[in-house]
Amino acid sequence: MKPLLSSPFFSTVVLPQESVSTSEPKQGSGVTLLVGDERSPIEDLESPCVSGQEATCPFWRVFSSTFFTIFLAEIGDKTQVSTLLMSAEFHKPWIVFLGAGTALVATTLIGVGIGQWLSSRLSARTLDIAAGIMLALISASLIWDVVQM
């Protein structure tokens, strides 16, 4: 069964055969449900690229997802503003670039290492919930600061 929409950023929800009365793809309001696959929807939503213990995501899917997520998150943040100001102040753009790039690689290495360590001890679902709670707390803190002004 082939999904109608294929993208590294979207996954298809697949329902077990017994949960729907027909084996034809259902379409409506922009969501495609495929019926009859042996995987449950929970397995697809938890980790679409893992089969048992062996990772099955292609290199370019992981690379492009990571690149675009980090690229969009970093545009306009304080790191970019800092490097812009340092480049303007020192008039040595290549040295600033090398310093900032090395720092980003080092912090990313720390993040990947801690992520790998945590993933060997906690489930992906637990990590998702913990990250969601941390982001919600940070957001609430920022909103509280704005309200107090």
Image (spheres, rainbow, N blue to C red):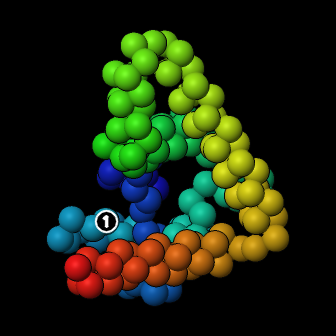
Which residue does the image show at 68% across and 38% down from the upper left?
A: 106
Instruction: Please report the residue visible at 76 percent of the width from the left and 50 percent of the height from the top.
Output: 113
Q: Where is residue 99 shown, x and y percent of the image?
A: 58, 25
Quadrant position of residue 109: top right
Q: Residue at x 39, y 46 (%)?
A: 78
Residue type for callout 1: Thr
Q: Residue furthest left?
A: 29
Q: Nearer the viewer, residue 33 or 145?
A: 145
Q: Which residue is mark 1?
A: 32
Q: Nearer the viewer, residue 66 or 81?
A: 81
The residue nearer to you, when weighing 64 against 31, is 64
Identify the image quadrant of residue 147.
Answer: bottom left
Q: Is residue 2 above or below residue 137?
A: above
Asked whether residue 6 is in view, the answer is: no
Q: Position of residue 59 (x, y in %)?
A: 61, 35
Instruction: Kindly state the secondary structure of the residue where label 1 is placed.
Output: strand
Query: Which residue corresponds to the image point at 26% horizontal and 84% vertical from the top-left?
Result: 148
Q: Nearer the viewer, residue 125 or 133?
A: 133
